[in-house]
Structure formats: C-alpha cells, structure tokens
Image (cartoon, rainbow, N blue to C red):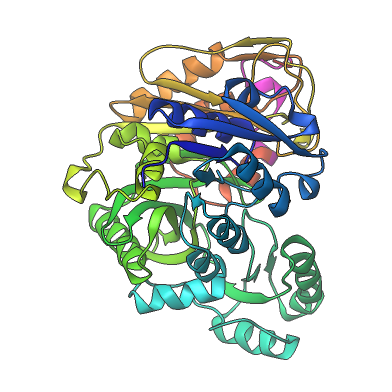
Amino acid sequence: MTISSVLIANRGEIAVRIIKAAKALGIRTVQVHSAADADMLAVRLADEAINIGPPAPKKSYLNIEAVIAAAKAANVDAVHPGYGFLSENGDFADAVAAAGLTFIGPSGDAIRLLGDKVAAREVAKRAGVPTVPGSGGRIFDLAEAHEIAERIGFPVMIKAAAGGGGRGIRIVESLADLDKQFPLAAAEALAAFGDGGLYIEKVISRARHVEVQIFGDGENFIHLHERECSLQRRRQKVWEEAPSLLLPQIVRQKLCESAVALAREVGYKGAGTVEYLYDEDSSEFYFIEVNTRIQVEHPVTEMITGVDLVQEMFRVAGGAPLSVTQDDIRPRGHAIECRINAEDPFKGFVPAPGLVERLVVPEGDGIRFDTMLYEGYTVPPFYDSLLGKLIVWGETRGECLIRLGRALDNLVIEGLATTIPLHQALVRSSAVQIAAFHTRFLEGWLETEFSPKNHIRSEVA
C-alpha cells in the first residue's frame, strides 16, 4: 500500500525533516504538538496540526492514546515516530498497527527484541557478531555482579538492559565501587525506563564508537557504511562523521557485513543502526546495541551515499522493496555533523531556552542545516535542547573541516546561548584534525583545553 498521508508523532528538527521528505513524495502531513509547541516550525510546515496535550511529554508526545486518537481523527495512512519519544516503543508500534495504520519502522516484536540490550546481544551472537565481554544476560543480585566483574576484570560498565541514549550507564573501578553503584544503577534504570534490569560489560579503554546504517525491507538487507561517533559528552554524541577515518578497510568490511548479518537474522524492516565499539589496539570490534529507528546523525550517511533515508522509510513501509541494492551504495567524500544545542558550553552546558532574535544560516555547496528554528521562535524549556544539525560535505576530510569551520563562523543564532563555540574550537583542535580521539577524549579536552579564550566568538551568538 502506497502511503498518501502521515502523522508525525514527534517534534523539533526531526519533525521538520520528516515533513520535507513526505512532501517530496507527495504525502499529506499531519503534525501533532503539545500546547508548548503550537508555534513550532513543523506545525507551520505541515498540512494539518493537532494539539494532543499539555507541555509535559508524558501528557502529549508520550501519550499513546492521544497520538492514536489524533491519527484516526486526521484519517492518515501511517505514523512516523522520528527518534526519541515513542520511536522505540514496541507497544506503540503495536497500537498503530491495531488501529489499522502503518507504523513507519520495524514491528513491535522486532523493537522489543532488539531494544532489550541483553536479548539483542543474543541475536548478535547467533548472527556471528562479536560482543563485548560481559554478563550473558540480566544480573539479578550483587553477588552475581561480583562474580562477573572479577571474571572479566575492572573497569566494568553497569548498563540498563532497557536503556538508551547514554542513560543508565555507570563505570565501576572496584568491588567497593560496584557495591555502591549497583543499587543506584538499578533505581536509575527503573526510573528512566520502567525496567530496573541491569547487565555488565567490560570497559574498553580508548575505544572508538562506530556505527553502521542498515536498511531492510524484510527480505533484502543492505548497509550504507559506517559513521564515527566517538566525540561524546556524558555518553551523548556531540559530533558525528562518515566514514570513520582510521578504520582499516578489512575491519570496515567485516563491521558492515556483520551489521547486515544481524539485520538478516531478524528479518529487519526499515531503517536501523547497529552500534559497535572498536578497539584500535587490537583492531577488534564489538557489538553494543541496535537502534530501531532513524538516527539523529543520519544526514552524514545521506551526504556520502546520496540516499534519502527518510524517503526510503516511507517507500519500504508502504510495501515497496528497497530502491537500492548493495552494489548501488558507493560512498563518496566525507561528511561531518555538529549538533547545535541550546546550551551554554561555558557554564557546564546548562540548558538555555529562549527567543531566537536573529538567525543566519550558512549556504553553499556541501552545506546543510537541519533545524526547527526561525526568527521570532521561542525555544521551550520542556524538551531536548537540540536546535539543529549543521552538516558539511567535502571531497576529503581536510576539505570538509575547512568548509565546516567557515560554516560555523557564518551560522548565527542570537538571543540564546548555543554550542556553536564548542564546535568552532573542536574544528581547530589538532587532535580532531587528525581524528585522534576516542569515546573519553571530549570530556578530558573540555577540562583542559576549552575556554572562552580559545575560540573565535566568545560572546553569546
């Protein structure tokens, strides 16, 4: 069934991104919104908008009944969940299907299987994908945690079985630390995900975070190569690029093939991402998790492959086979994405919602800015601080960095603090210029090298 109308069950820049992709395919768009988002850009761009509740996400964007009711009222064919909120909620996918609508993503069963990190590890093992040494499943008591930690060796990482987005993770250096952190991690996991289940993994020092974009139509499965996502703060990605510069070709091939094997193992349908840790010292890679949705960083993959991933999601969800084969995917050049947040990087990244008094977006070949902003828009304080993503492409990584530096200098968002200065400083970092970083690099760099004195614009932009 070809999709002719869609309800976007999300907000912010990803809602704008989905609307643009839908309109390019001639699909009617219906945007849900909270009372706080009545004037957001996605509402202005959509063909129709429906208020589904108060500002609090639990009463609006996370309210499954309200979203389904809006979809029925708008008489749409499908629901696109974007990322975050209900995008990886299997019950939501089931509710959409039960309402006679198409969920643009994998099935509820697939979301539940791959969304549980312990179950996903077992799928990875069946597919022959290497996994990080750790517990074979959920850990139910501290004594078991002791046994596993002593067997694999410290430091270890306690992780929420149902976690995501870097939440519910604690690094433990000793048994005494484990005794302290284990109950706290369980409580944190229960509060964040409604599931207090934990498991343990070995910490790989100086690891790189590399992920592979996969796509399937249920019968055919491909990869669209890898992304480097090692620049992270508190396990939240800040800067992403494609391809990964220092990944040996033979490792790159095995990594991507393993991701496709995992997709084939579960008959995956839709866009997804398989995430790995890569140990440069041993040239080994290890499976972390699967994200059963479109990723924030998907534009860098689009920039090097020329494939519109969101449009492909619509086609596949509508019953069409993949429009490209593996042989069609021929990456070209290099792309980098900077997440621009409403946060003050000089004050501990405190959120900085407020009025956008002036907006100047850089233009030119190889420059893209995915955003929800417009002049006169007031960024509300109730949601994630992401304002937009500056994506730049170049024939080489060096050319890409030069173009990115110029684009950052020309990007102006006045009226509130943003993370633009952070990215300006990163572009000029000697370590970043040669891609000599790992998942723990950024936090150390922030403490030792980042200050208002070492970037171009120290004033609020």
Decide if residue 240 is on the left or right side of residue 7: left
| Residue at (48% x, 15% y) in the render | 406
* Res. 36 image quadrant: top right
Decide if residue 367 is on the left or right side of residue 222: right
Q: Residue 272: x percent and y percent?
A: 43, 53
* Res. 381 image quadrant: top right
| Residue at (48% x, 66% y) in the render | 110
Q: Nearer the viewer, residue 300 or 307?
A: 307
- Quarter of the figure with the C terminus: top right
Q: Residue 153: x percent and y percent?
A: 58, 79
Point out the stretch of residues depicted in magenta: 447-459
| Residue at (79% x, 64% y) in the render | 191
Would you say residue 149 is visible in this rendering?
yes
For the view shown, which residue lies furthest in the left direction?
327
Q: Is residue 371 magenta?
A: no
Q: Is residue 452 magenta?
A: yes
Q: Residue 82: x percent and y percent?
A: 55, 43
Q: Residue 329: x percent and y percent?
A: 23, 43
Q: Nearer the viewer, residue 420 or 291?
A: 291
Determine whether 191 is above or below 105 in the image.
below
Determine whether 53 is above or below 356 in the image.
below
